[in-house]
Image (cartoon, grey):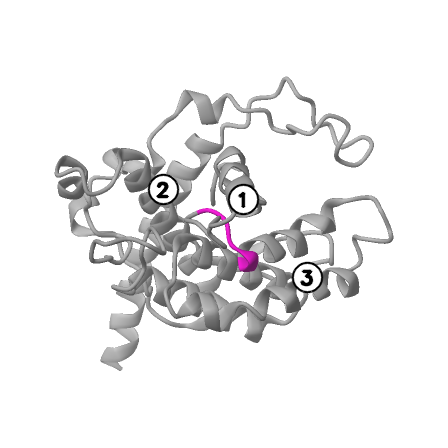
Amino acid sequence: MLFRRDDFLTDLRTCLSPETGSPWRKALYSPLLHNALLAISLGFLDDPALSPINVRSHFAAHAARFLQAELERPMISTIYGLILLARFHGAASANELGYMYSGMALRCAQSSECTWSDKSAHKPVGLGIDCTAFVKRGLISAETKESRDRAFYTCFVLDKWGPSRARPHKLTCRLWSFHAGRAAVLTMPVHQINLLDIPTASLRDDVDGGMQNPLEGSGSAGSGLTSDKRSWSSTTFRETVKLCHIAERILKTAVSFAQGF
């Protein structure tokens, strides 16, 4: 599911504002994320000047230049940027490089240094932690908690379901943990074992009802995408998380058998 477009654009406008003192990144915007997003999204254009992989690789390379600065204090935008870089390189058949970027994203999700603000005065905590108490104490907003939960479950899915070799302008996926022959890195949090109560993947009419193709006139001719089709992205994401939890349990069993021989 990654992030909602409106949330990204809100943070983008704040960070790129000409006003003095504007932050250079926020929870859902950073230079790393911005360039990684361009590296992926330009591949869906019909413009031969922008869609080729060799053109988009420049954006991916530019995104990587911000890694050290962002990893010193990772934010949710850092994690999303790493996820997109992993998908870009995986789709470009650079599977080992994509695998490394995905590993960095998963480690950031687990890191106790993953924070929600560059200027946060509160001790940051890793994703996957139940932040209900923080909301009740007024330390973070309910929206921030939802954003953190969504980021964790995006990483949770990525851990099991990564990009595979594909044509430059398309993305296909394979079961990454199975392909690598390893156990899952991120497991379902104990407080969310009840799959019917996954907060980040709960059903949302405002998300499910969003347009499947929100940009009028975008997409290839004959793609069949029309603005009156519901996206069902919230429902699809929740069900994908549930499937990945099943995959996690299968992996755990398979690895335990392998260790027994």
Q: Amino acid at mark 1?
A: Glu
Image-quadrant location for residue 118: bottom left
Distance of mark 2 from mark 1, alpha carbons?
26 Å
Dot 2: what SS? helix
Q: Nearer the viewer, residue 42 or 120?
A: 120
Q: Nearer the viewer, residue 172 or 90?
A: 90
Q: Residue at x 56, y 55 (%)?
A: 173
Question: Looking at the image, do the residues carrying marks 3 and 1 touch, with CB atoms under 8 Å apart?
Answer: no
Question: Looking at the image, do the residues carrying marks 2 and 3 touch, with CB atoms under 8 Å apart?
Answer: no
Give the crowd class for mark 2: few <14, some 14-19, many >=20 residues within 10 Å: many
Q: Residue at x 46, y 51 (%)?
A: 23
Disc count in the image? 3
Which residue is denoted by mark 1 in the rendering?
19
For the record, the magenta segment spans: 28-32
Could you say where residue 40 lies in the image, as x and y percent from the top left? Answer: 65, 53
| Marker disc for residue 59 | 3
Mark 2 or mark 1: whose residue is earlier in sequence = 1
| Marker disc for residue 147 | 2
Vertical arrangement, residue 211 with respect to residue 241, above or below? above
- Most extreme residue toward the front is 20
Vertical arrangement, residue 209 with respect to residue 182, above or below? above
- Most extreme residue toward the top is 228
Could you say where residue 199 lies in the image, as x and y percent from the top left? Answer: 28, 36
